[in-house]
Amino acid sequence: MKMTRILPALAIVAAALLLILGITASWWRSDTPEPAPFMIAAANPYATEAGAKILRAGGSAVDAAIAIQAVLSLVEPESSGLAGGAFMMHFDPLSGAIEAYDGRETAPMGATAELFLDEEGNPLPFLEAMIGGSSVGTPGVVKMLWLAHEDHGKLQWAELFKPAIKLAEEGFAVPPKLAEAIARDPVLMNMPVAQDYFYRLDVNGERIPAQKGDVLKNPAYAATLKRIASEGEKGFYEGPVAQAIVDAVQNAPARPGTLSLEDFAAYEAKKREPVCAPYREYRICSMPPPTSGGLTALQILGILQNYDLKGMGPMTLTAVHFIAEAEKLAYADRDKYIGDPDFVDVPVEAMLDPAYLEARANRIDASFSMKKAEAGEPVDRRAMNRGLNQPIDKPSTSHFSILDSEGNVVSMTTSVEGPFGSHLMAGGMMLNNQLTDFSFMPEEDGKPVANAVAPGKRPRSSMTPVIVLTKDGDFHAAIGSPGGSRIIGYVTQTLIALIDWDMDMRAAISLPRFIDRNGPLEIEAGTVLEQMTADLESLGHEVKAVPLMSGLHGILVTPEGLDGGADPRRDGNVVTGQP
């Protein structure tokens, strides 16, 4: 009798316990949100997948950047690599801090101001200056990545090189852009090491360039990566890798250089104060000098802040005119005032002063182009007695943007100059020709040029990695591009499309390109902009339709979620996922 009473009671208790456990489990599940998504936009699917693999394993945005750069050095050697340089912007959502990492190459201690002059003191033809050892600067990207990893890395350094090592050993399919670059290069076939890597012999013994889809293996690069992975940054800056680069430079078949092991030992990556300025309701942050990109882009936006671009409408004749005129003004300042801040005084604050930029904006005539802008006179007088730089920037380079699941952001632009840099190859890597970013002429009308060559100096760059924050300090967008001195215009036009014209990232990146570097107004050939030529000429612009190969890769936060874009002009893509 007692047992029959106890059993129902136990059943009731058990049911109650199960109900409580079920409610608790349900509550626990609902209180544990799914990890936030990550996103990567980069110039090659091999690279984006390498970065995604790192993020899926719990790595940080910086961890992913290291893996991406290691792969790009293999699959996009015409544009960037570990024997080149880079600039990285990093955003930490917890502290709200934006950091700027400078991995720009430096001139060897044996470099002189006459590095790119002939015996009569005239500038060398660019191709002659570019090819060979004298154009190679001390590479900076590995030390920059090491520095950033010390600050923000989560995974072990060695883990980050495994995707690139695997690809180098097992081979990768030649992407379309690399195949096109090899086919059109006039020198690569005749360069030692490179000719054996990028070409094969046909049945007649003739060299045939690697075709799209051909499988390339790079055991020399795999060996380099293994050394860097196991020894850290010293694996690049000391020992066999550094020695191989020095030997290639000093024994180059054309214009041997002075790069030495002492230059490698002396190299330092630097953290610099980012340049930031308001634009509409956002805060735009980018790299400071020695790149001219951030400062010049912020000047363009600061000038245009005085005008209603939204009211002008996207890509209208009026909008194109005002943007082009603002670019003329900013590029004029760029060519006079910007160089390596460790060697010359760059009047950054004065160049971004709103009153100065408003005065520059007042020089724009809505009815006619100013043709050629003169540099302004910012209130900082230290930089007044300068000659004009004579820039020769080539449209290579690469950019990627990363947002990890914890909200950390990397916007990084990276380059060997080129295409194919100096065309020298060592350790499985193309060596940069970044020293040709210096002004070939050290003086202009008897005045020193800010960007003249000097030992240990960093050449002025145009790289413009950008991070955009909301007025509350939250991450809004990351963007950047390759393209030589046109990078600044590509990035600025995209920011205007995102902010003034309310475009999504893919639409902003896909816009027809135009840019005025204080010369002719260049418009992208084969686009609807060509229909505007007559009207632009009636406003006094000299219009040139040319190929404009931007390579924009960006991430945008929208109310609906993340929006990424990869430039359709290149081989890149966007990957998103969760750890």
Image (cartoon, rainbow, N blue to C red):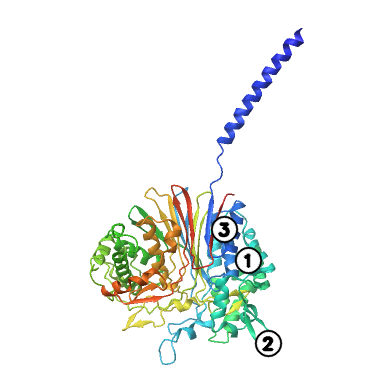
Amino acid at dot 2: Gly
The span from disc 3 to disc 1 (Cα, nearest Å) is 16 Å
Does the CB distance between marks 1 and 2 fall below 8 Å? no
Q: In which quarter of the image is the N terminus?
A: top right
Frontmost residue, 256 versus 400: 400
Frontmost residue, 296 versus 157: 296
Residue occupying the point 61% across, 54% down: 155
Residue 289 visible at all: no
Circle 1 Cα neighbour tier, 10 Å, few/some/many (<14 / 14–19 / ≥20)? many
Horizontal side, residue 396 vs residue 489: left or right: right
The span from disc 1 to disc 2 (Cα, nearest Å) is 37 Å
Single out the mark in the foreground, 3 or 1: 3
Does the CB distance between marks 2 and 3 fall below 8 Å? no
Horizontal side, residue 388 vs residue 15: left or right: left
Horizontal side, residue 204 vs residue 463: left or right: right
Numbered mark located on residue 228 in the image? 1
Q: Name the residue under label 2.
A: 205
Q: Name the residue under label 3.
A: 64
